[in-house]
Amino acid sequence: MAPSVWRAFAKSKLPPLVLTPLQGLPWVQPGDDLPALLLAAILRQGLTLQDGDVVVLAQKIVSKAEGRYRLLSEVTPSLRAVELGAETEKDPRLVQLILDESNEVLRARPGLLIVEHRLGFVSANAGIDHSNLPGSAEDAYLLLPQDPDASASRVRSTLQQASGAQLGVLIIDSHGRAWREGTLGTTIGLSGLPGLVDLRGTPDLAGRPLRVTQLAAADELAAAASLAMGQAAEGCPAVHVRGFPYALREASLNELLRPRERDQFR
Amino acid sequence: MAPSVWRAFAKSKLPPLVLTPLQGLPWVQPGDDLPALLLAAILRQGLTLQDGDVVVLAQKIVSKAEGRYRLLSEVTPSLRAVELGAETEKDPRLVQLILDESNEVLRARPGLLIVEHRLGFVSANAGIDHSNLPGSAEDAYLLLPQDPDASASRVRSTLQQASGAQLGVLIIDSHGRAWREGTLGTTIGLSGLPGLVDLRGTPDLAGRPLRVTQLAAADELAAAASLAMGQAAEGCPAVHVRGFPYALREASLNELLRPRERDQFR
């Protein structure tokens, strides 16, 4: 956004939160230089990278760049995968891919397989999605990045070097919820921005401690970016964010995950 | 935002999502004309209301305008409230207020009381918060609005009449999650914008049906607006939204709530 736009907001103390979908990214392929593609899209759209900006990436383009494809023909299902496949009405080889990416199965019903992903979050199908592998006619599935925090950190490092600005990078996926319908963009990896913002001890306007003690700032941004990506999540899988209202700092996904011993709903 | 700002975005197909905190709202009191206060804040900030814009309100200002205060001195706890008070280490009179606003208790532990709110969603303490009642020295608590969908509809009607634009109004509160740390801005009432956006049957760029079938668009916007409100949620409890990427339509909270028989995690 041009600097003149930002001067228009200067009179307000709280700046607006502006999420701009990055358009015209190519179909990402294994080995692609994702930070270079992002920088080109940012420049082409007339955007800049300034201190405090955040770039949000849909998991899919990160996984594709990292070549996280698996072919069903290369999977031999275990006995457990065959049994779970019958229970969930899923291909046992796909179930094997899910089990390989999971710590534990939480719920299995026809059409539904909810696990604790090896990265620690609760997830349907371990986040594995059907996805075409370029140059292959075969059924391919795309796993989540091996280490999304590290992926975010690598992208951030390159964007920071190119821009000279202090940035955050967030990787998101669409997650279901326990008690509500519909999916919500949710953090699976981050670098340089807080997962949680601790409001404990911050007084409200009446001087009382706030009821809300820890705000899931990264997950609120994940949902916001998912909304900005709109329906065309495959076509516009990256969002430029200006006006993130909290100080940037080092963080990891773990701070957003509730330790099992404090989890009341498994 | 001035029209000149929007022309700068005209070259991009997907408009940015812009969330502007409404500043300078007064401390809302029972009987206040909330739509009039919002219109004044919108004008004062140089914003406009155009077709497709959404105004997001923190629950607190709606409840305050509706006078949803309760004084503990006027509450007689039942035997059950006394027992639950001991179990949760909460004032039995507060527990009684929570029970009066709830369909069912889901979890009770020291410091924790999770219920199904009478409006149907899962909630800590039925969303009841300590809040000063103007003109009273006594301990007061603020309940959620009696019917948040209806509250949203009333505000929307006045804003639409004043602006001539088709708008959405969303009322949000901070909710915890089952498996993750931190709170997330979440819908408790809405009017004029979709709760869910049904993507079933929408092909992705490769022509395959999308994995994500129903997107919780209103909850994504709720999280985004909560983020834009920033730490000063008491001081800036309303957000103007431009660029919501889905068509506005009539809706109610119910479409966001998972029917109990399909809920795997109670």
Image (spheres, coloured by chain):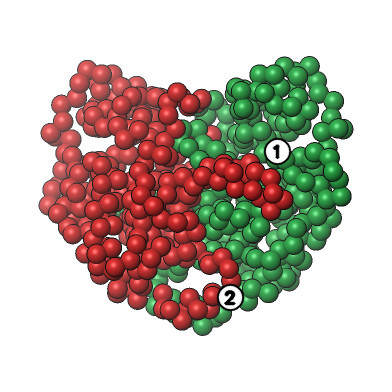
Chain colours: A red, B green
Q: Position of residue B193 (x, y in %)?
A: 59, 56
In the image, taking residue B112 as reference, residue B243 lies left or right, namely: left
Q: In what element is the residue under mark 2?
A: loop
Disc 2 from disc 1: Cα separation: 35 Å
Q: Amino acid at mark 2?
A: Lys
Instruction: Pick whichever, B201 or B96, lies toward us.
Output: B96
Judge whether residue A227 can be spotted in this image. no
* Residue positioned 28% across, 69% down in the render: A163
Q: Position of residue A200 (x, y in %)?
A: 57, 42
In the image, taking residue B99 as reference, residue A8 lies left or right, namely: left
Front position among marks 2 and 1: 2
Q: Quadrant of the N terminus of chain A?
A: bottom left
Mark 1 lies on residue: B128
- Chain for numbered disc 2: A
* Residue positioned 25% across, 42% down in the render: A147
> Could you classify mark 2 by the number of other residues whose Cα lies within 10 Å: few (under 14), some (14-19), or many (20 or more)?
few
Rendered image: mark on residue A11: 2
Tell me which corner region of the image, top left, top right, bottom left or bottom right, holds residue A124.
top left
Instruction: Pick whichever, B265 or A53, lies toward us.
Output: A53
Tell me which corner region of the image, top left, top right, bottom left or bottom right, holds residue B242.
bottom right
Whether residues under marks 2 and 1 lie with C-beta atoms below 8 angstroms apart, the answer is no
Q: In what element is the residue under mark 1?
A: loop
Instruction: Pick whichever, A117 or B14, lies toward us.
Output: A117
